[in-house]
Image (cartoon, coloured by chain):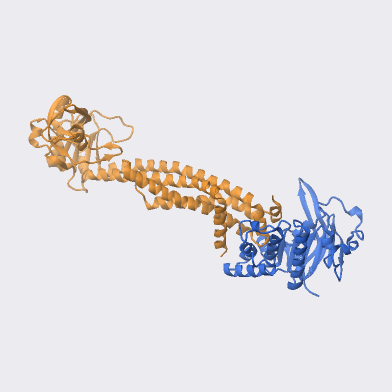
Amino acid sequence: MTVAAIEAVDVWRTYELDGVSVSALRGVSLTIDQGEYVAVIGPSGSGKSTLMHLLGGLDRPSGGRLVIGGRDVASLTAPELATLRNQTIGFVFQAFHLLARTSAVDNVALPLVYRGVGARQRRERAAAMLGRVGLGHRLHHRPNQLSGGEQQRVAIARALVTEPAVLLADEPTGNLDSVTGEAVLELLERLNAESGVALVMVTHDQEVAARARRRIAVRDGLIRSDSRHDRPGPDGAAVPATLDPAPSAEPRSALGGAG
Amino acid sequence: MRVAEAWRVASDALRANRMRSLLTMLGVIIGVASVVILVAIGTGTKQQVEQQVEGLGSNLLLVVPGKIEVGTAPVVSPLDLRDVDAVSRVVGDPARVAVTVASGATARAGNRSDFTTVQGVLETTPSVFTRSLARGRYLTGADVDTSRRVAVLGASVARTLFPDRDPLGQQVTLAGVRFRVIGVFAPLGQSLGVDRDDEVHVPVTAAQRLWGTQRIDGIAVKAPDRERIDQLGERIVAELSRRHPDTEFSAVTQQQILGVLGDILGVLTGVLAAIAGISLLVGGVGVSNIMLVSVRERTREIGLRKAVGARPRDIGVQFLLEAVLLTSIGGLTGMALGVGTALLVDAFSPIPAAITWWSLALAFGVSAAVGIVFGVVPAQRAGRLDPVVALRAE
């Protein structure tokens, strides 16, 4: 058995809104192993984004234990948590989040800046990574000179340039048309298979989720199902039934005002 | 390494908003330039006055009735030429004692006229004060003894009354009485905006007769050496007080005059610099304002940087450097503008201006400090942003 990349035990996340406590996560336990391909699925407001922020070390749990890369998040200061993100996690966002006035290669090199890598080596590694995502010919283009699919591939290269243990992708195809989205998904899957980075993809698209080996359904701040599939379906349409959140063990009465 | 990267990011950010950066800098530029210019004018004026006071002559002692203090009323002088003789006896050498009785008067020559200061003096004036003649000769003892109506013209009086001919031997009419020009002074220039060449020297006896008075306004003594100058002043004041018990007398040295003038000009320079400093402060507020806008505009960028591993400090340093860069470039530009303007003012206007290295260092230091002081709040705000919230920002 491999060492867990991320381990969450009874994790809560509660927000104070105008004096009222709202729990976005209400006791979530899960483990992300190295090299896994996991889809986190759930409707908007289910708490899946909150879960993603916690798994990526962008946020801290209000209760429970969260261990990322072998380190308990609760024991880390803000700078230590930032360093942990830099070393362990790669993020891919729906909106790409590329720096607009910065070339593709410098966008990809950005995480290495905060790792203290020298300028020349940063560029070399960023250029190599862009080559791996098929953008070796677009090094010096700016985001506005790239298509949506290309921008997301730059973002993927940026997420992987630090060789993280986990790649967290939040609706990575949400801003892309289906053909481009398919290409981006294939790229993510290929990198997952090739480099052994765990791929955790948050989506509300069941077809996308159906491709993963493991599907975690989140609703009302709780994990409703966590199912593994030895062989992923050839495409999403073939296996919709397994994703139905019906086999939930949680009684309905426990669910309620989730943010 | 990270600092180098932060510099690059900061300069990129400034370039991306050229107009805004420029306008923000303008506040700092104007502030720094005005500090440099006003301090230069203050310093230049002080230096000029010091030079002129020192240029009057060496080891001078000025004796006048009344107190030399700001706010005391002028006193009608009780002195006359007998008191001058008494002072000469105290000094021990009449050649070291000069006098003046002065009044404004209109000088005329032909159809030209000039309102000027007529000074009644002794022939000893050139041996007490440093004055040199451009042409002719100065007054003699015989001129004074016989109240001869002869005059030595200041350079600008000579230029006004005799623009195209030699004044020597010509007649000038002073307060309606005709005098013969025997000499013309070499020009002295201006002091605090006053033309020092706008005067006419005549024998003190002739001047007293002209105005129907026996009065002497003041006595100047050239002390034999600097060490005993204060002691000599005290003896002269004691002698005059004995002769005129109802009047107070003051003896001041050049050093004392320089001290008083230096204090006044120092305060003036300080006030000017403070006023200019206020504009620098306003420039700093502008920097703070624009940095807050910049942080808000780039909230998503901050969120992304944090997501990929930027620590709060990394973000804070980046924005602080941006503010410091803004004010430093503004400061350097303002310095260049200030130095250039000060040099032009010095060269092409009667106002003197002198650049001192400390005023430049101060102006630059203050502008960089303004960047730090006014950049620190926006930088802290950026550093503390919650990455989750920042990534969601519109």
Question: In the figure, residue A67 lies in which quadrant?
Answer: bottom right
Q: Is residue A169 found left or right of B356 in the rendered image?
A: right
Question: In the figure, residue B150 lies in which quadrant?
Answer: top left
Q: Colour of chain A?
A: blue
Give the position of the N terminus of chain B as an image quadrant.
bottom right
- Residue A100: image x %, image y %? 63, 56
Q: Residue at x 57, y 63 (%)?
A: B2
- Residue B230: image x %, image y %? 23, 44
Please say if A14 is above or below B55. below
Question: In the figure, residue B320 lies in which quadrant?
Answer: bottom right
Q: Is residue B379 found left or right of B328 in the rendered image?
A: right
Q: Colour of chain B?
A: orange
Q: Residue at x 88, y 64 (%)?
A: A238
Q: Is residue B78 found left or right of B27 in the rendered image?
A: left
Camera-side residue of B246 and B376: B376
Camera-side residue of B259 and B139: B139
Q: Residue at x 61, y 64 (%)?
A: A113
- Residue B218: image x %, image y %? 21, 34
Camera-side residue of B198 and A79: B198
